[in-house]
Image (spheres, rainbow, N blue to C red):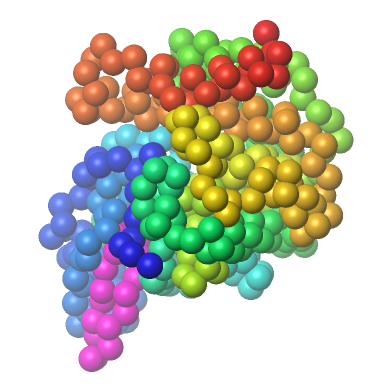
Amino acid sequence: MGPRYYRSVTDKVAVHHDEQLARRGLEAWFADRGLADPRVTLLPGPQLTGYSHETIIFDVASDGVTQRLVARVEPQDVALFPDPDLRLEYRLLEAIADEPIPLPKLHGCESSPEYLGCPFYVMQYVDGLVPPDAYPLTGWLLDASAEEREQIWWSGLTALARPHLVDWEAKELEFVNGERTLGLSGELDYWGRYVDFVGRPIAPSAERAWTYLAAERPTGTPVTLCWGDARLGNQMFADGHCLALLDWEMACLSDPIQDLAWFVHFDDLFSDGLNTARLDGIPSRDETIARYEDLTGFETKHFDYYELFAAFRFVVILQRLGNLQVGQGSLPPDSTFPIDNFASQYLERILNEKGIP
């Protein structure tokens, strides 16, 4: 189906580890876990990069057997989110490993900084294709047939819905929220604090959206396990089927419609938001919402609210990313990108179309 595409818009180069030190650290970790004379070879990919978790793809050989694995490593110097806790993410993945959710097999989590200088966990490598976020403009999904795109979309939506059906109370997943209140109120509290973490001023469209979101919060909404970063660019596919849901650092216990809205918003943002036609074969918004309701039984009457919430969240995340790039010199000090970019401009369009002052 063509070359692999790994990078997302939030996966920018920011090297934190020396490759030789990373290789030796992993070899020491495997040796301490009982693997005889492990030999690690780092492989091409998005490794040693990123403002979210770093990703290292590697082979480890021992006693004539070679495994291809992936290490997810906490960022050391800069982070996209406050207080990243990769061990919490691993605990969640471990707790839902027996659910019908497409996930890589887990191989262990390390809390000590002894090996790579910070916590990390190791999981099985999944051989598949990840769409770039800008798939209407580039990549293998652009080159696929309309029929293939439709199959990929529906498979991705089905996989997205599966965490929402987990009995999170029976699995005692309250730890996912940390100190946050369960549900939408906890999410709004978190993103209010995230704005403080990013620092004001934020984009004028984001301020408008935040005022509306705080004032018009729906009540009585359900609480489920939400994947958090639920987008096609965080899913791995082969032969039209979703093999894995990736990147769980935004997981929470909240209204599942926020996942659905995030999924739809990213498709809109990287097509309509970039003045590009949606790809043929990608089902419509109404078809997607109807299929989701059939899959889960959840009502989607607050979809418009969560669509705005999705747009707001991505704008402030992109501002944090832009601030980091300015700080590291990859953007000039006077760059306006952090608060004036395609996402903030698209949010302004959404607000105007909805008649929100």
What residue sits 53% from the left and 42% below the top? 278
Q: Where is residue 176 in the image (x, y as percent from the top left)?
A: 62, 48
Residue at screen point 82% across, 37% down: 301
Residue 31 versus residue 222: which sits nearer the camera? Answer: 222
Check if residue 280 falls in the magenta segment: no
Q: Is residue 164 visible?
A: yes
Q: Which of 230 and 151 is in front in this view?
A: 151
Residue range highlighted in magenta: 55-75
Q: Where is residue 179 in the image (x, y as percent from the top left)?
A: 63, 37
Q: Position of residue 49 (x, y in %)?
A: 27, 47
Residue 28 seen in the current view: no
Is residue 74 magenta-colored?
Answer: yes
Residue in the image at 56% along x and 17% along y: 348
The image quadrant that residue 310 belongs to is top right
Above or below residue 263? Residue 196 is: above
Left or right, 237 with respect to 222, comes to: left
* Residue displayed at 28% across by 88% down: 65
Q: Residue reaching furthest bottom?
A: 64
Q: In this view, does 93 lie above or below 126?
A: above
Q: Is residue 285 left or right of residue 251?
A: right
Where residue 332 sits in the image (x, y, percent)?
Answer: 22, 18
Pick the residue in front: 307 or 288: 288
Residue positioned most to the left: 20
Quadrant in the picture for the C terminus:
top right
